[in-house]
Amino acid sequence: MKKNTKRILKYLIEFLIVAFGVFLGIYVSELQSEQKLKKEKEASINFILEELSNNKKNLERSINYHQSIKVELDSIAKTFTEKDLFKTYLGNDVFRHHNIKGWEGIALASLENTAFEAAKISGIIKEFDIELIQKISKIYNYQEEYVEFGNTILTKMININATSKIADAFGTIELMAYDLLNFEETLVDEIEKVKMLN
């Protein structure tokens, strides 16, 4: 009986040592996984913030340009008569968009979304704070709307033809100088809010 007790005690001690070793191994593995996940999360957030920072710089360049075009349009609009607005745009001597001082086209800001898409695809985004995810998603959705709106304006400019009036062309450029500008200013504000969250 004493022999059996010693043998059982021996096996129990060996079992406890093995169990502790397994537990310790799992615990260390979990710690390493958490550290790796934390580093990936931080790296992903930094990539997104860097991407948004670059987008902000591009937006600020477009804002400056669109503000200058807005000033020019305001001064040009004062020179029009109502009759002028209904003249055919092509071949008129009253208004041509390329004669606007500083004109460089629609100048839609180039906006990237690679870091955000990578975070979604990898699944790391689910580790972000929910408020941060909402703010970031809002910006990227708004960026898409901005690009779509800019492309709409570009399409309107391309579709100017022999039947278009000065009012059509001028109105299209006003969309760029007012509404597109408003999009850009809102996006810059939203990007600033995300930077403050982090």
Image: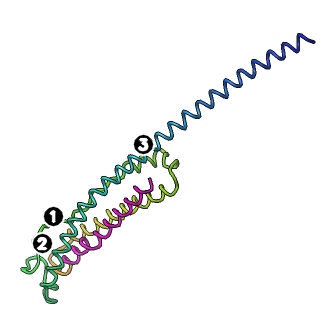
* Label 1 SS: loop
Say whether residue 172 is magenta: yes
Q: Quadrant of the N terminus?
A: top right
Q: Nearer the viewer, residue 160 or 60?
A: 60
**Residue with the most extreme left position:** 93
- Residue at 14 percent across and 72 percent down: it is 97
Q: Which mark is residue 12?
A: none
Q: CA distance from mark 1 to mark 2?
A: 9 Å
- Which residue bears the numbered disc 3? 43
- Callout 1 touching callout 3 (CB < 8 Å): no
- Residue at 22 percent across and 68 percent down: it is 66
Residue mark closest to the camera, 2 vs 3: 3
Amino acid type shown at disc 1: Glu
* Label 2 SS: loop
Residue mark closest to the camera, 1 vs 3: 3
Badge 2 density bin: few <14, some 14–19, many ≥20, Cα 10 Å: few
Q: CA distance from mark 2 to mark 3?
A: 45 Å
- Which residue bears the numbered disc 2? 100
The colour scheme applied to this rendered structure is rainbow
Amino acid type shown at disc 2: Ile
On screen, residue 131 versus residue 179, left or right, reads: right
User: Relative to 128, is 87 above or below?
Assistant: below
Q: Quadrant of residue 13?
A: top right
Which callout, 2 or 3, points at the residue further toward the start of the chain? 3
Amino acid type shown at disc 3: Ala
- Which residue bears the numbered disc 1? 104
